[in-house]
Amino acid sequence: MARQEQVLLLEPQHELKFRGPFTDVVTTTLKLANPTDRNVCFKVKTTAPRRYCVRPNSGVIDAGTSINVSVMLQPFDYDPNEKSKHKFMVQSLLAPPEMTDMEGVWKEAKPEELMDSKLRCVFELPAENEKTHDMDTNKVLSSSLLKSESSTLSMKSMGSPLDDGEVKKIMEECKRLQMEVQRLREENRQIREEDGLRMRKNTAMSSQHSSPSSTSGVVMKEEGPSTRMLALVVLFFVIGVIIGKLVL
């Protein structure tokens, strides 16, 4: 006895197309529609089960509804000279009323109750001109992004001296350094006055006692103003650098 004609509507009907490159998982969708007034059990089988992952690969489609089956081709080394011999088969069976055990229904089904549809797998690679176009597009996009980033950076670098927040910080730093310089000047002036008094006292004492130890004390005291002068020079240099940034 001949098998029944497939009641499910398949989309696509004859071919499952997979578009490369096949260095990653490639997924295509198979739609199964049940136009009848009865529930239909289905199974999706393949001649290469290790190459494909099918979700769902079996189940029940309610009357008047449809389901999408994802067929995922696993990555592999594609050979364009090798013709694909992979095939899929969608097997279906009208579900009995009040079905509780779907696997039991499949086991007890008679051959004439089973319906099936076969699909072949087709592998497609992008044409060479499409590859070239994609590469050119990627180059254009990359160069555009680089130009955009460089122009953004240049705008930022040009606009940074005009940033109110940064100018305010630099001005505050300038004021702080100026106050520090003023304080050091005042301190240096006081030290000079004190050193002048000490030198006069030491000169008077040295003329009376001619002690070499007092002379060495004078020399050691004179090192203080030199250190202060060095600090003043460094501070003036820092202020010059900051003002130079403001001008640029």
Image (tube, rainbow, N blue to C red):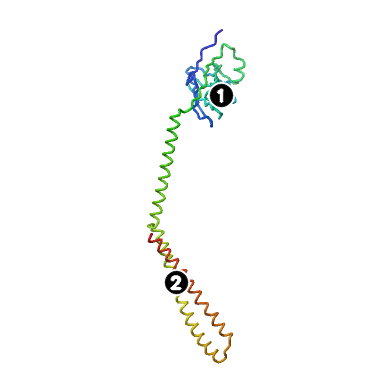
Q: Where is residue 27 shown, x and y percent of the image?
A: 51, 28
Amino acid type indicated by mark 1: Asn
Q: Amino acid at mark 2?
A: Val
Q: Position of residue 166 (x, y in %)?
A: 41, 59
Q: Which residue is mark 2?
A: 181
Q: Is residue 157 above or below residue 191?
A: above
- Other residues around mark 1 within 10 Å, as few (<14) / some (14–19) / many (≥20): some
Spot occupied by residue 83 in the image (x, y as percentages of width and height): 53, 21
Quadrant containing the N terminus in the rendered view: top right
Mark 2: few/some/many CA within 10 Å (<14, 14-19, 20+): some
x, y percentage for residue 85? 55, 20
Q: Is residue 9 or residue 62 the one in the foreground? A: 9
Give the residue drawn at x 58%, y 26%.
Answer: 51
Name the residue: 54% across, 11% down: 3
Figure check: 229 above or below 50 = below
Of 188 and 104, which appears nearest the observer? Answer: 188
Q: Which residue is at a point 59% across and 14% down the rendered structure image? A: 109
Q: Please say if 21 is above or below 236.
A: above
Q: Circle 1 is placed at which residue position?
A: 57
SS for tag 2? helix
